[in-house]
Amino acid sequence: MKSAITAFWVGVLFAFGLGLSGMTQPQKVIGFLDVFGAWDPSLLFVMIGAVGIHFFAYRWSLKRASPLFSAKWHVPTKQEVTSSLMVGSVVFGMGWGLAGYCPGPAVVSLASLQTKPLVFVISMVGGMYLYRLFDRFFPLAR
Amino acid sequence: MNDWMLSLFGGLCIGFAVSLMLFFNGRVTGISGILNGVLSPQKGDTLWRVLFLMGLIVGGLFLKMGSPQSFTDTSTRTWTQVIVAGVLVGFGTVMGSGCTSGHGVCGMSRLSMRSILATAAFIGAGMFVVWFLRSVLGGV
């Protein structure tokens, strides 16, 4: 229960970060990806800020034997670079450039009660189910 | 504050949020993975996911009240493009095991080679699509 409540507040803080940074404005995201046009590099600072903190917090946290509210660490340990990883990431990137939404900002934008984030999130969940169907016929190592 | 300072500040909030998730729960804050996990619920592994997603939406409600300009949408993408994009994002993030948060923030911070390559791939693909739509198809 404690870990679920923590997750809630992490979500709230994450949403603030996304909203303040500009990630919930599709045209701004498209401007960031438009390196061959009127490039708006400001969203680069989102990653610099986030990685800048987490790079150190990760190293500091993992000095402990376990996290505070769980018996063990759940950090991914897979190393292998698979074709699923690369193809999937390219497919994701195409969708990101097409709409200007990645998953987090789209979910946060549901709160705006605009129609577009809702349509996007429903389509995204549809895409996740579509992958399950694909995986049944072509099970690939992810 | 100008745009890049706001972006930096927002990024610091995100970095702090994912660090809390790691320190307290020992988990990576990968939003596509958390959502995908809700679609195949496992006993004892669903409540935290649902509450995290609710937190995102509650945070969004606070933003809507305090900073409604955060939801400015001047994009001219068509509905068909938005729907296709959503399907690609859902399919691709499950196939590629992560999105901007899981690979781009958490994985890059761990210097995971998988996440560094995935991030380069989705940013590159996004740049290509934006260029293609603007210069080849003549849209924005």
Image (tube, coloured by chain):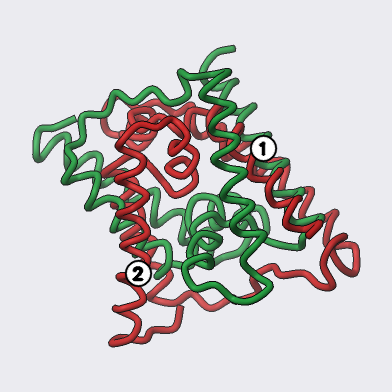
Callout 1 secondary element:
helix
Q: Is residue A40 above or below residue A98?
A: above
Which residue is under mark 1?
A13
Q: Say what amino acid the circle numbered 1 marks.
A: Leu
Residue at position x 36%, y 76% in the image: A132
Q: How many labels, in total?
A: 2
Position in image of residue B75 (x %, y %): 27, 28
Residue at numbered disc 2 = A129
Which residue is painted at 64% across and 39% down in the image?
A12
The image shows residue B140, relative to residue B84, as above or below, that is above
The amino acid sitting under disc 2 is: Tyr
Q: Residue furthest left?
A: B137
Residue B103 circle label: none
Helix, strand or loop at label 2? It is helix
A92 and A47: which is toward the camera: A92
- Chain assigned green: B
- In the image, which lettered chain appears red? A
Which quadrant of the structure image shows residue B42? bottom right
Callout 2 crowding tier (Cα within 10 Å): few <14, some 14–19, many ≥20: some
Could you tell me which residue is drawn at 70 percent across and 52 percent down? A7
Mark 2 chain: A
Residue B123's spot in the image, x, y percent?
39, 48
User: Residue A58 appears at what percent x and percent y?
Assistant: 76, 55
- The Cα–Cα distance between marks 1 and 2, rounded to whole angstroms, is 28 Å
Left or right for A57, reference B43? right
